[in-house]
Image: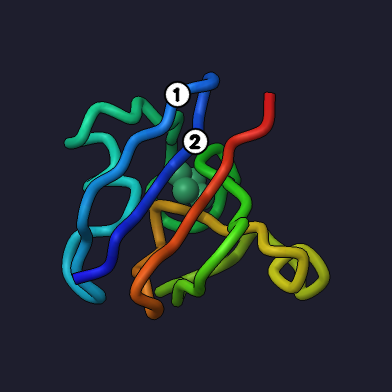
């Protein structure tokens, strides 16, 4: 299990997530983060956040280019943690 912190709307949500199974989007929203989403297929970019610390794997990514991924942008609907701790922010 990884420790996940998501900062959105000036609020921090902290919870644990496994490296496979439900996406970080699903787990975050089950924990009250209220992250926006639409397609849940890695296409629309609605769920895009930015990794501040840690690493994740994406099942599918049809929206972000390599530069964006290198900068830390991530589609939460496709993401699973690969480090012990991951911090993700949502900018307004
Ligand atoms: S909800 Fe569309 S890319 Fe994640």
User: Mark 1 packing: few (<14 Cα in 10 Å), some, or many (20+)?
Assistant: few
Residue 38 lies in quadrant: top left
Which quadrant does the N terminus fall into? bottom left
Q: Position of residue 16 (x, y in %)?
A: 20, 56
Residue at 34% of width from left, 35% of height from top? 13
Tell me the CA gap for discs 2 and 1: 6 Å
Residue 66 lies in quadrant: bottom right
Residue at 32% of width from left, 54% of height from top? 24
Which quadrant does the C terminus fall into? top right
Residue 74 lies in quadrant: bottom right
Left or right: residue 6 versus residue 71 is left
Colour setting: rainbow
Q: Which residue is mark 2?
A: 7
| Helix, strand or loop at mark 2 | strand
Left or right: residue 20 versus residue 53 is left
Q: Nearer the viewer, residue 67 or 83?
A: 83
Q: Which residue is mark 1?
A: 11
Total numbered labels placed on residues in the image? 2
Q: Nearer the viewer, residue 63 or 72?
A: 72
Position of residue 23 relative to residue 32, above or below, is: below
Q: Nearer the viewer, residue 64 or 18?
A: 18
Left or right: residue 30 versus residue 67 is left
Q: Position of residue 87 (x, y in %)?
A: 49, 54
Q: Give me the disc on residue 26.
A: none
Residue at 45% of width from left, 24% of height from top? 11
Q: Position of residue 27 (x, y in %)?
A: 22, 47
Q: Is mark 1 within 8 Å of ligand 1?
A: no
Q: Are marks 2 and 1 in contact (CB under 8 Å)?
A: yes
Position of residue 67 relative to residue 32, above or below, is: below
Position of residue 29 relative to residue 26, above or below, is: above
| Helix, strand or loop at mark 1 | strand
Q: Position of residue 17 (x, y in %)?
A: 22, 61
């Amino acid at each position: 299990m990884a420790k996940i912190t998501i900062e959105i709307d000036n609020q921090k949500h902290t919870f644990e997530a496994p490296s496979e199974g439900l996406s970080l989007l699903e787990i975050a929203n089950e924990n009250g983060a209220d992250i926006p989403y639409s397609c849940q297929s890695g296409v629309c970019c609605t769920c895009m956040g930015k990794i501040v610390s840690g690493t994740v794997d994406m099942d599918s990514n049809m929206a972000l280019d390599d530069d964006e991924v290198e900068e830390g942008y991530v589609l939460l609907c496709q993401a699973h943690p690969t480090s012990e701790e991951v911090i993700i922010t949502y900018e307004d």
